[in-house]
Image: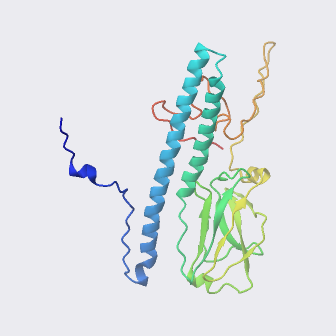
């Protein structure tokens, strides 16, 4: 028996490469041209990270379901513990990747040599976004810098205070600058050393808020304590251990059944873990 192979099967495999056409259209459009290229690369990275995150969620469902099946057939099977441990690692990785997906959406502004930028993230002590806080550029005395509009931290906690050229030109050489945070009527001044800022400077300033500062800004929901109902049969609710990262879902409770994922959503396609504060 003779077999004829198509010529295309003899062609060596070469993975496709990302191609970007860079046009030098002059200084007038350089900033927008470069931003367009960076945007395309970042969008591809975010899509890849999100696809990997979904694979980990699917793996968690499969591992947890198999562990439940074995537990019903042979409760003493040594593989049950290994499967559950694998499911916990998968959900932990999916939560880490969810953070990376959010960070991949961050877009750092392009800064001309006549402008200045102070940027960073506003997070809690677990590196989670603090919430929808308004960030204002202030001088060392706490007064807002005129001409620089306040911005709101995005879903990743990122903020970027771009100082226009006309404002950067009149900043004093020995000036020092920081940020103030506001949510509603509450305002705080985070504790860090004010930084110098002048035309052409790009300063990174991450802000980590304490629990007390988060409570003062009221950016996290506070749930009232559960109290037993009056009556002889009333019982106080059993204390629930707060899960560490990777132990239980982001809602802080175990699933009702071994078949349920730690994330809410349809069993056919797990949804993204919620960011419930």
Q: Quarter-wise, where is residue 180 in the image?
A: bottom right
Residue 271, given in percent of the width and then of the height, sits at 51, 38
Position above or below: 65 against 154: above
Which residue appears farthest toward the right when viewing the image? 232
Rendered residue at 66%/26% (across/down): 81
Between residues 185 and 214, which one lies in front from this camera angle?
214
Q: Can the viewer see residue 110 in this picture?
A: yes
Quadrant into which the C terminus falls: top right
Residue 125, given in percent of the width and then of the height, sits at 74, 52
Q: Can the viewer see residue 149 in this picture?
A: no
Quadrant into which the N terminus falls: top left
**Which colouring convention does the figure follow?**
rainbow
Q: Quarter-wise, where is residue 93 in the image?
A: top right
Rendered residue at 63%/42% (across/down): 276
Q: Quarter-wise, where is residue 233 in the image?
A: top right
Between residues 173 and 241, which one lies in front from this camera angle?
241
Position above or below: 54 against 64: below
Residue 99, given in percent of the width and then of the height, sits at 59, 50
Rendered residue at 50%/40% (across/down): 55
Q: Is residue 194 left or right of residue 264?
A: right
Position above or below: 197 against 21: below
Position above or below: 225 against 16: above
Rendered residue at 75%/29% (across/down): 240
Residue 109, given in percent of the width and then of the height, sits at 54, 70
Q: How many marks?
A: 0
């Amino acid at each position: 028996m003779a077999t004829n192979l198509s010529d295309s099967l003899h062609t060596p495999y070469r993975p496709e490469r990302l191609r970007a056409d860079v046009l030098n259209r002059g200084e007038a459009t350089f900033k927008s041209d470069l931003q367009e290229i960076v945007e395309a690369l970042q969008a591809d990275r975010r899509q890849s990270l999100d696809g990997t995150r979904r694979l980990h969620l699917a793996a968690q469902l499969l591992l947890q379901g198999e562990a439940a099946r074995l537990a019903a057939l042979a409760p003493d099977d040594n593989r049950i513990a290994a499967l559950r441990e694998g499911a916990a690692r998968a959900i932990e990785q999916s939560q880490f990747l969810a953070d990376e997906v959010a960070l991949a959406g961050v877009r750092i502004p392009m800064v001309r040599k006549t402008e200045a930028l102070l940027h960073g993230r506003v997070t809690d002590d677990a590196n989670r976004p603090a919430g929808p806080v308004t960030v204002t550029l202030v001088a060392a005395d706490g007064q807002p810098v005129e001409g620089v509009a306040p911005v709101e931290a995005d879903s990743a906690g990122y903020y970027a205070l771009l100082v226009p050229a006309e404002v950067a030109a009149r900043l004093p050489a020995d000036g020092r600058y920081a940020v103030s945070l506001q949510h509603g009527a509450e305002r705080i001044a985070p504790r860090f050393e004010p930084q110098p800022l002048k035309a052409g400077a790009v300063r990174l300033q991450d802000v980590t808020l304490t629990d007390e500062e988060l409570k003062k800004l009221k950016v996290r929901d506070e749930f009232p304590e559960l109290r037993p109902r009056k009556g002889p049969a009333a019982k106080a609710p059993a204390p629930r251990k707060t899960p560490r990262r990777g132990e239980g879902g982001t809602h802080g409770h175990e699933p009702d059944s071994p078949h349920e994922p730690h994330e809410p959503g349809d069993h056919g396609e797990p949804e993204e873990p919620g960011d419930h504060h």
